[in-house]
Amino acid sequence: MLCECGCGQDAGAYSATDRRRGKPKRFINGHFFKGKTKKTHCIRGHPRTPENLYPNGTCKKCMDMCKADSMSKFREWARTPSGKLSVKNTGLKLRYGITLEEQHALLEKQKGLCAICSVKLDSSDKNLIPHVDHEHIPDEPRYSSKKVRGLLCGLCNRGLGQFKDSLELLEKAVKYLKETQ
């Protein structure tokens, strides 16, 4: 099918929407295109040349502007104690749907202990930092609300993850340990 503007180029799109994805056709520079198009400039209009790009694809000129602008202020703020708490609170809200206060209340409810092995949770040791244990639902969106089950130490949290939260696998592991002792 040819482009609808009459230029004679192949449109590359054969319906009003891409039937596989349900996305509309793209209309760029007077032509319909299918798939991604290569960008020649960044969002602020700087040319995307190898000399002007970092290896991860960000524009060097834009990054220089950000360093002199508000981004450096944000980065400095995120390193302050109140900024660190705010960043942590936002991360808990996004990942687990709870606030920092709710996490502290849950820790008090568990008397500062891991819900499985009852070791004292403490932020000074990597394995004793409180980890939020939540229900894993297959094929769920990454930041959907999750059911929080409790706070665990790092070792117990990784152990449950290795057993894929499967009661059947955990029962087999208990049976194996009883038989081999």
Image (cartoon, helix red, strand yellow):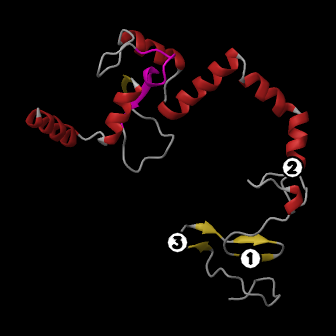
Q: Is residue 130 magenta?
A: yes
Q: Amino acid at mark 1?
A: Phe
> Residue at 32% of width from left, 20% of height from top?
115
**How many residues crowd mark 1 within 10 Å: few (<14), some (14–19), many (20+)?**
some
Q: Which circle's residue, 3 or 1, is located before the other in the chain?
A: 3
**How far is mark 2 from mark 1, CA to CA?**
31 Å
> Residue at 47% of width from left, 17% of height from top?
102
Which numbered disc covers residue 148? none
> Residue at 84% of width from left, 52% of height from top?
59
- Above or below residue 129? Residue 163 is below
Q: Amino acid at mark 3?
A: Arg
Q: Nearer the viewer, mark 2 or mark 1?
A: 2
Image quadrant for the C terminus?
Answer: top left
Q: Which circle's residue, 2 or 3, is located before the other in the chain?
A: 3
Whole-percent x and y of residue 105?
44, 12
- The residue closer to the viewer here, 162 or 71, is 162
State the extent of the magenta-drawn residues as a range: 121-135
Which numbered disc covers residue 60? 2
Q: Amino acid at mark 2?
A: Lys
The quarter holding residue 109 reads top left
The quarter holding residue 117 reads top left
> Which residue position holds label 3?
20
Which numbered disc covers residue 32? 1
Direction front: furthest residue: 181
Whole-percent x and y of residue 15?
61, 78
Would residue 138 be found to the left or right of residue 32 on screen? Answer: left
Whole-percent x and y of residue 71?
82, 33
SS assignment at label 3: loop
**How far is mark 3 from mark 1, CA to CA?**
17 Å
The answer to whether residue 48 shows anywhere in this view is no
- The residue closer to the viewer here, 78 or 129, is 129
